[in-house]
Image: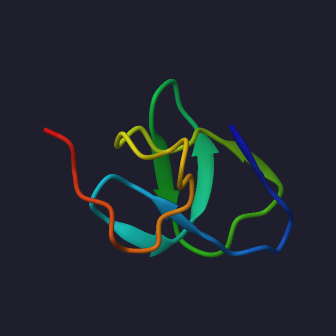
């Protein structure tokens, strides 16, 4: 899991879709809300590269 500080905006990997999002915790995914993240714990991306790059830089590819 990754802590996103209040007011901090980050690109969170959504396994193919990259956006600056507000996040809430799900069992194995990241839910997208509008706006910046506000002090939440979020699960890291499960695209297969999360250990090396938990935050998306736009280059991740969806794992099928």
In which quadrant of the rendered image does the N terminus lie? top right
x, y percent for residue 60: 32, 61
Answer left or right for 48 relative to 61: right
In which quadrant of the rendered image does the C terminus lie? top left
Count the marks.
0
Seen from this angle, which residue lies furthest top?
27
Res. 25 image quadrant: top right
Position of residue 29 relative to residue 6, above or below, is above
x, y percent for residue 9: 69, 75
Answer left or right for 39 relative to 56: right
| Residue at left offset 22%, top offset 51% | 62
Res. 37 image quadrant: bottom right
Res. 38 image quadrant: bottom right
Q: Nearer the viewer, residue 1 or 26?
A: 1
Q: Nearer the viewer, residue 51 or 33?
A: 51
Answer left or right for 5 relative to 18: right
| Residue at left offset 61%, top offset 75% | 35
x, y percent for residue 47: 34, 43
What kind of colouring is applied to the model shown?
rainbow
x, y percent for residue 13: 45, 58
| Residue at left offset 53%, top offset 55% | 53
Seen from this angle, which residue lies furthest front?
52
| Residue at left offset 32%, top offset 52% | 15
């Amino acid at each position: 899991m990754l802590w996103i500080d209040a007011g901090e905006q980050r690109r969170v990997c959504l396994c193919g879709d990259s956006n600056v999002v507000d996040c809430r915790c799900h069992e194995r995914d990241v839910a997208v809300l509008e706006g910046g993240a506000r002090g939440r714990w979020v699960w890291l991306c499960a695209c297969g590269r999360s250990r090396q790059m938990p935050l998306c830089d736009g280059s991740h590819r969806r794992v099928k």
